[in-house]
Structures are given as structure tokens and as C-alpha cells.
């Protein structure tokens, strides 16, 4: 970073999960599928889903409290809240505003949501980085929370098997020791292939004008198309991110990727030449938790002792938009 830019510290990371577990076997009650088909194609055995009134705000709030506690930062110290979600309970108020209210954070603090699907955390981190670097804000709460179990079409066996609900959160601050925990960060999108994953909004035109043809409800995904696109670009993209940062794959301790399909994760792993102990995977238990996926994988792997702190990691994700992105980060002692 240039001399005048303020470095960023990742101060805390947290997550939350709903209690209800839906196994692959459970899904056989909904449609013709099998544990064997789902597991061999995706690496997923089970996923967590909300039930009753619980939603992405509740999950995000819990993850935020968890991250604030880990960071040893009080809600009143937060001066900006950004939530990343593509499965919010409402279009407005924003999830970030709901969380502001629940945490009792002052009305002087801005709060807004972004939509970058499963790349949401990386997008939010890049926004936070720019705000911190400029000195505009000092202590930012990032919440990545998704509740896709409410938005998938539960009759579509090719899509609904993939998703689970969860939230992750990260507290970032202006670094007081001159060390920047974001060594490199990059975000990308290609709207020209946006139809690979779509979720249309319900509504009607003014009754006085011609109506439009409503699109089918629920998430619609061209799974093969997404797979082909991501398998083609992601391994190369992550490798370039590392090279452009002046580093080599072996300089980085862990790969913490978006958990969408075990075969895509393995393609990135192979490209980087990493052994299994350097790669975080929890897709087996949670499926694809969208924006929550990366912070959940990070926080849980530290909690379980798989990822040691005082290390570096490359985070990478992709999702609807299409969006994709990556970050090379330092994982300080005490963040989880
Ligand atoms: O963050 C969101 C990002 N999204 C993704 O990462 C999705 C990436 N794509 C994928 O992970 C894979 O494309 C899927 C797991 C979604 C699907 O795997 P696939 O190997 O591409 O299967 P397919 O869609 O080509 O389907 C193959 C066959 C079809 O039957 P026929 O036409 O060959 O007779 C499907 O009808 O498998 C059938 N099928 C199923 N069979 C049992 C589709 N879903 C299921 C199912 N159980 N759940």
C-alpha cells in the first residue's frame, strides 16, 4: 500500500448455523435422488436449514455478536455495517439496518447491504478495505448471511440439493501496528453470463398497463454451465492473484475457498499444488451456504484446530452475477 493509506486489521471472525440438519437421505422424501448421487457429484452429505420464523437476519445477528466478541470490540465502536446477502427476508429494511438495531448501534452509523451472491464476503471486504485505507471509517462490521433454503425451488432436485443456510461475520479495523492483513484483494464480475444463476422478483405492473410474463419462482441455475465456467476460470484466477501479489503458492499456508462443489475446490487445490491439510472443506456438513460460506469455513476451521493462526490464507469465491473474487489475508492470533 502507498504511504498515506491506512492498513487494515482483521480483528475477529464469527459464524452461526441453524440447528436443523437435512441429510441427503431426508431429500429422498422430496424427489428421486440418492445420497450416492449427491455426495459423488458435490461432496455434500447434509446441510443446515432454518425453520419457522428464523431467517438471515437472525443468523447474521448471531454471527455478528460472535465476531465482535472474538475481536473484543463493543457494538458502540462500530462505525459502518455492511451486510452481504442474496437471500434476505426483505428487500428493505436492509439486513445491515436490522442488525444495527439489534446490536443497539447508534443511528449515526451507516448500514447497507450488497448483493454479490457467494462472492459477497470478498466484495464486502474490498469495500471495507477502501474505506479504512482512506480513513473514512475505522471499525467496520461485515456480515455475510444467506437463507437460500427459502428461495430454492424444492421441486428442482438439481439445485435444491446444493444449498444450506448460515451466516459469517468479520470485524475489521484500522491497523495500529502498520501491518495490513489484506495482502491482496480482487473482485470481478461478468453480467453477460448472468443467466447462469437467476432469482426473479415477484410483482405486477400497474393494473392500467400491459402485464409482463412472470418468470418461474425460486432459484434457477444452469448447474453444468456454472460448473464449466468456474472450473475453467477459478484455478487460473487464484494462481494469478498470488503471482500478482509477488508471492508463490507455497508462501501461503491455507486455501479457504467458497464451498460450492468439492470438485471445483479440488481443481483449485491441484492448480496450487496443495496437500489436503492446506485446504479447508466443510461442504460435506453445510452444503453451499452462499455468502456465509467463506467466513464460516474460516472461523470453523480455526475453532476446530485445522487452521492455525499467525498464518496466511487465500480466500476465493464465485457466484451469481456472475461474480468472483479472491483475497490473500493474514490470520492473526486471537481472531477466532
Ligand atoms: O454458488 C452457486 C454455484 N453453483 C454451483 O457451484 C453449481 C455447479 N454445478 C454443479 O455442482 C453440478 O452441475 C450439479 C451438482 C448441480 C449437477 O451435476 P451434473 O453432473 O452437472 O448433473 P446434470 O445436471 O448434468 O444431471 C445429470 C443427470 C440428469 O439426468 P439425465 O438427464 O442424465 O438422465 C439429471 O436429471 O442427473 C440427474 N439429476 C439427479 N439425479 C439424482 C440431477 N439432479 C439429481 C439429483 N439426484 N439430485
Image (cartoon, rainbow, N blue to C red):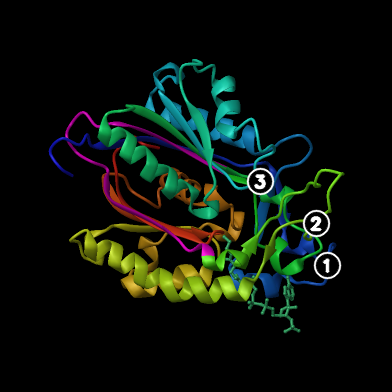
Q: Is 73 located above or below residue 117 in the figure?
A: above
Which residue carries the number 3 mark? 147
Is residue 190 in sight in this rendering? yes
Q: How many marks?
A: 3
Which residue carries the number 1 mark? 31
Q: CA distance from mark 1 to mark 3?
A: 21 Å
Q: CA distance from mark 1 to mark 2?
A: 31 Å
Q: Position of residue 335 (x, y in %)?
A: 36, 36
What span is colored magenta in the figure?
167-191
The answer to whether the beta carbon of the residue marked 1 is less than 8 Å from any atom of ligand 1 is yes
Sort mark 3 into few (<14), some (14-19) or many (20+) by Cα contacts within 10 Å.
many
Q: Is 195 located above or below residue 125 in the figure?
A: below
Q: CA distance from mark 2 to mark 3?
A: 28 Å
Picture disc at residue 212: 2
Q: In what element is the residue under mark 2? A: loop
**Residue at the spot x=52%, y=51% of the render?**
116
Badge 1 vs badge 2, beta-carbon distance below 8 Å: no
Front residue of this view, candidates 31 and 142: 142
Q: Position of residue 32 (x, y in %)?
A: 82, 72
Amino acid at each position: 500500500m502507498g504511504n498515506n493509506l491506512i492498513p487494515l486489521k482483521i480483528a475477529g471472525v464469527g459464524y452461526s448455523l441453524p440447528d436443523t440438519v437435512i441429510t441427503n437421505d431426508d431429500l429422498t422424501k422430496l424427489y428421486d435422488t440418492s445420497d450416492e448421487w449427491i455426495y459423488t457429484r458435490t461432496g455434500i452429505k447434509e446441510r443446515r436449514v432454518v425453520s419457522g420464523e428464523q431467517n438471515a437476519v437472525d443468523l447474521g445477528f448471531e454471527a455478528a455478536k460472535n465476531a465482535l466478541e472474538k475481536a473484543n470490540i463493543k457494538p458502540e465502536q462500530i462505525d459502518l455495517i455492511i451486510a452481504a446477502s442474496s437471500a434476505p427476508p426483505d428487500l428493505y429494511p436492509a439486513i445491515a439496518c436490522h442488525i444495527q438495531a439489534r446490536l443497539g448501534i447508534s443511528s449515526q452509523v451507516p448500514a447497507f447491504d450488497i448483493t454479490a451472491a457467494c462472492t459477497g464476503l470478498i466484495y464486502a471486504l474490498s469495500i471495507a478495505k477502501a474505506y479504512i485505507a482512506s480513513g473514512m471509517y475505522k471499525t467496520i462490521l461485515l456480515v455475510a448471511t444467506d437463507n437460500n433454503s427459502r428461495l430454492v425451488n424444492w421441486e428442482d432436485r438439481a439445485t435444491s440439493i446444493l444449498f444450506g443456510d448460515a451466516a459469517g461475520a468479520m470485524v475489521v479495523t484500522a491497523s495500529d501496528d502498520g501491518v495490513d492483513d489484506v495482502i491482496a484483494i480482487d473482485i470481478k464480475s461478468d453480467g453477460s453470463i448472468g443467466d447462469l444463476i437467476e432469482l426473479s422478483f415477484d410483482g405486477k405492473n400497474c393494473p392500467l398497463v400491459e402485464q409482463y410474463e412472470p418468470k418461474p419462482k425460486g432459484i434457477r441455475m444452469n448447474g453444468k454451465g456454472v460448473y464449466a465456467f468456474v472450473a475453467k476460470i477459478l484455478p487460473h484466477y487464484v494462481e494469478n492473484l498470488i503471482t500478482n501479489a509477488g508471492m508463490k503458492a507455497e508462501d501461503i499456508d491455507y486455501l479457504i475457498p467458497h464451498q460450492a462443489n468439492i470438485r471445483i475446490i479440488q481443481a483449485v487445490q491441484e492448480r496450487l499444488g496443495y496437500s489436503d491439510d492446506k485446504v479447508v472443506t466443510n461442504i460435506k456438513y453445510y452444503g453451499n451456504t452462499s455468502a456465509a460460506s467463506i467466513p464460516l469455513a474460516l472461523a470453523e476451521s480455526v475453532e476446530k484446530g485445522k487452521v492455525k493462526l499467525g498464518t496466511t490464507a487465500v480466500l476465493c469465491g464465485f457466484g451469481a452475477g456472475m461474480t468472483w473474487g479472491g483475497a490473500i489475508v493474514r490470520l492473526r492470533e486471537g481472531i477466532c
